[in-house]
Amino acid sequence: MKFSKNILCIGAGYVGGPTMTIIALKCPEYKVTVVDINEERIKRWNSDDLPIYEPGLLEAVRVARGRNLFFSTDIPEGIRAADIIFVSVNTPTKTFGHGAGMASDLQHWEKTAHQIVAYSGKPKLIVEKSTLPVRTAEAMERILSENKKNIHFEVVSNPEFLAEGSAVKDLLEPDRVLIGSQQTESGLKAAQVIVDIYAHWVPAGKIITTNLWSAELSKLVANAFLAQRISSINAISALCEKTDADVAEISFAVGSDARIGSRFMKASVGFGGSCFKKDILNLVYICRSYGLNEVADYWEKVITMNDYQQERFVKKIIKEMFNTIVGKKITLLGFAFKANTGDTRESPGIYVAKQLLEERAALVICDPQALENARKDLAGLDHGVTYELDPYRAVEKAQAIAVITEWEVFKKLDFEKVFSVMQKPAFIFDGRNILDHQRLFKIGFNVFPLGKPSLTHF
Ligand code: UDX
Ligand code: ADP
């Protein structure tokens, strides 16, 4: 079959994989190829055991794969054939050198730019999908335009706003699609090509076009604002625990103000995920590099508060369990950074597990999707850790449960049964406030919610 356009995506991860699947699903006349250096990942994209878990993703992949959606490791051929290249490689926080712990590590991204130059024989439209520091497109353009072949590459920014666990829904019904381009004739033309892709299923009013720098910065700012809401409510949860106020009641009362809104107001053990911390650090680093120290300090506090919330959670477990947890069996219900994903990047579960292990607790980790990643995260430290898929087996003889992830299955557990197999006194620390605390208390548990009075039998 002859396709009207060849789209390539470099990077078959959490962003590239689902995004290209939906583009292929909705645009059958385009050929969409996703390439990655990781052979194992590509093998899994070509099987029914996808490398990432997202509700609805396998069904969508099955419709488009082999029709107009292809997964491959042949990067040179992919680049040669492409008209449009989405770059969706990982840009983690730098762990070394200048800007370590703050700036984005752009080595994968830069390698990609050089590969594009090396294998291209015709002009191409390059789309930044990875979250990048503002003005990265400028650097990308510089690398691309220094090619000796005199090929024109136009760079546009199309940041991804999908959230893990709801990626398919977010892609099918986005709040908005953002496309930033140079405001030149060729830049505006390039933006229109990307608009045309999304216009297959996204209403015109939801497709926003801006200049390149606004698009890049909007992504960082959106994540900073979302994370700020969580840190704000988490800060209040600490105050609630001192004052007998109830953070859920406060969230409801405050969120009912239409100007504030009710979403992203759930107190938790802390936010995780690959974006929030990384993007805020990135924003902070950029502000500092422009000498805007007050602005940098302001946003950095969102992270400080998130670290504090995780520390507070662990300290509370230790304190309430009579100041020692040596040898005590503690079950973590959940390890993923949020429900409906197996992703554990920056999950508060990692910090909580490491701290509890340091205090020499015997840990059991239970998660419906994240055990494979949990094992990797705790590799070398997990002497004394058991990984258990079945929640009832996970709580056998445990002295305490700590809820880390808000999975539905945990809400629906038979807690009478859970109580009957645990050691007494039995403790529950609900890091997500998802359980029925009064009921648990009546069953006999000592219950420690977040930002609410504790319910104890002592
Ligand atoms: C986020 C953004 O939502 C998305 O737009 C962007 O493209 C990538 O980063 P994601 O990291 O997948 O998506 O998850 P998100 O749903 O935003 O949750 C982030 C963290 O905040 C999770 O750990 C979640 O559990 C936590 N959270 C969220 C809370 O603690 N309380 C809330 O009220 C909401
Ligand atoms: P994200 O959450 O941003 O999608 P992931 O880590 O899930 O990040 O995915 C990024 C993908 O990009 C990984 O599968 C990684 O192997 C791939 N990748 C990194 N560098 C390159 C490269 N130079 N060429 C092709 N793929 C790459």
Image: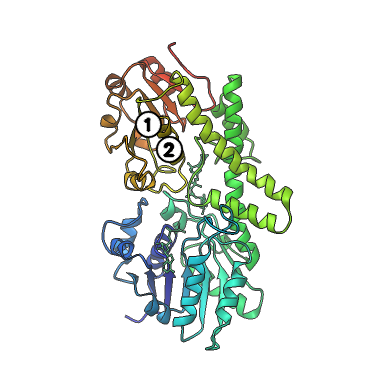
Q: Is residue 445 visible?
A: yes
Of badges 1 and 2, nearer the viewer stands 2
Classify 372 as above or below 176. above
Q: Ligand 2 is found in which quarter of the picture?
A: bottom left
Q: Kindly identify the residue that appears in the image at 54 percent across and 69 percent down.
A: 195
Front residue of 288 and 153: 288
Determine which quarter of the picture holds residue 232. Answer: top right
Query: Which part of the image, by quadrant, shows the C terminus?
Result: top left
Classify 447 as above or below 302. above
Classify 133 as above or below 242. below
Element marked by disc 2: helix
Front residue of 158 and 423: 423
Tell me the crowding category of disc 1: few under 14, some 14 to 19, or many 20 or more residues within 10 angstroms, Cα based.
few
Element marked by disc 1: helix
- Coordinates of residue 233 in the picture (x, y in percent): 59, 35
Q: Kindly identify the residue that appears in the image at 42 percent across and 73 percent down.
A: 8
Question: Is ligand 1 closer than 8 angstroms to the Cβ of mark 1?
Answer: no
Q: Amino acid at mark 2?
A: Lys
Q: Is residue 245 visible?
A: no
Residue located beneath label 1 in the image: 411
Marks 1 and 2: CB-CB under 8 Å?
A: no
Front residue of 215 and 394: 394
Residue located beneath label 2 in the image: 354
